[in-house]
Amino acid sequence: MTERDLRFDILVVGGGMVGAALACACLGKGWRIALVEAREPQRAWPPGETDLRVSALNRASQRILERLGVWERIIQLGVSPYREMYVWDGVGGGSIHFESTELGEPDLGHIVENRVTRLALWERLEAAAVTLLCPSGVEEIELMTDPALLNLKDGRRLSARLVVGADGHDSRVRGRAGIASRGWLYDQQAIVANVQVREGHRETAWQRFLPTGPLAFLPLLGDRCSIVWSVAEFRAQELLELNETGFRSQLQKASDDRLGPIGDIGPRAGFGLRLQHAEHYVKPRLALIGDAAHALHPLAGQGVNLGFLDAAALAAALDEARDKGRDIGGLWALRRYERARRGDNLLMMTAMDGFKRMFSNAVPPLATLRSAGLSAVDRLAPVKHLFMRHALGAGDDLPPLARLGAPDNRPC
């Protein structure tokens, strides 16, 4: 690379789904963009194999991905729509049922393998000739200069008008920038696996709240589901060490036999759970998005949807700065992004933490109260529809890329 090749307007650190989406959202606007990532996306996999990590993408995320020009490719690689959702309390027995037809919608969202979304975004960046610095990583960051300076682990030195940290909950960028985060580790792990449900999932997402944590069955293509089972850490190790027959027996019991007999079970893995929120999302020349800024309990599957909204909001703030002739790395632009997202993210994190604490216990009075609440909301159509619209990603306060209707005419 020449010295000019090492100077950029926007440098995204972290090439996962959210970081790649932000880079795509900045295309076609005259900016020199680079992305730093440790590992390339998986390019191919055996037919019928499903990634352990999947995401429930809501309508707002779908609109973002459509406007970034990658949704058709994602569909080609494989998505699984879900049209209904059943949630029930394993102690008190209360339940709620969501159905897309109640809102005149074709579905409530799509279950998509993380590797599928990431590959589609990377292919878009490769076609646009974005500078992809991979495999690589950040060693040092200097934000007190203009432009910011970065030393990579391979010895290269880069400069950028704006550095975007999209490198996950253990963000090196956040740490090097001296931004603290607050939160805690949950004494839980999420066990993930792909399982066969012999009676079929009926394009329905199922979630049972148990005292030990929620168990979700997310519909995949065919007769398989991705499970996300949150349990105490010691219990997670016990479940991961069971043979397939033993694990099937425990899963069958935990599912309340709601989906009928469980068949083949694929490989299992466990992931620690946490709540974490950065004290600040921005500094001069720096912005944090996605898990680098916030992490929450996965019981509602909102993590990546919040990350995509971060990317869309930051792209909108940068568009506004460009249109007004302002510095894209200055606080005038970056604080607009922070104001747009920090409060909403905090509200969702607080709600998910509250749900986790309310449902992850067997205290009789609380079990009775929460079950009554679930069943009451199920009968109150206006309230239930409000929940559904919020989960879908409806609303006028969304960034342009995520908003219902035609976005503005800025290239993306």
Image (spheres, helix red, strand yellow):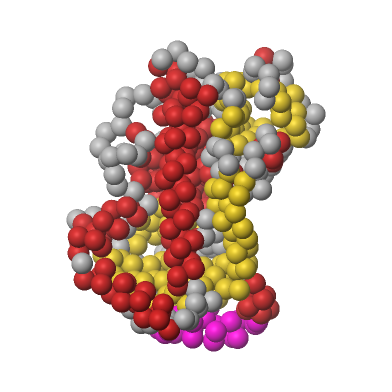
**In terms of depth relative to the viewer, which is nearer, 38 or 349?**
349
Q: In the image, is residue 380 above or below residue 18?
A: below
Q: Can residue 239 be seen in this snapshot?
A: yes
Residue 230 occupies quadrant: bottom right
Q: Say which quadrant the C terminus sits in.
A: top left
- Residue occupying the point 65% across, 42% down: 180
Estimate the x, y position of residue 333 in percent, counting from the top left. Answer: 48, 24
Question: How many labels were placed on the picture?
Answer: 0
- Residue occupying the point 53% across, 44% down: 290
Estimate the x, y position of residue 394 in percent, counting from the top left. Answer: 29, 47
Q: Is residue 331 toward the left or the right of residue 154 in the image?
A: left
Estimate the x, y position of residue 252 in percent, counting from the top left. Answer: 49, 84
Q: In the image, is residue 45 above or below residue 238?
A: above
**In terms of depth relative to the viewer, which is nearer, 157 or 323?**
323
- Residue occupying the point 44% across, 29% down: 336
**In terms of depth relative to the viewer, which is nearer, 403 or 356?**
356
Residue 103 occupies quadrant: bottom left
Image: magenta residue range: 242-264
Q: Is residue 5 toward the left or the right of residue 386 in the image?
A: right
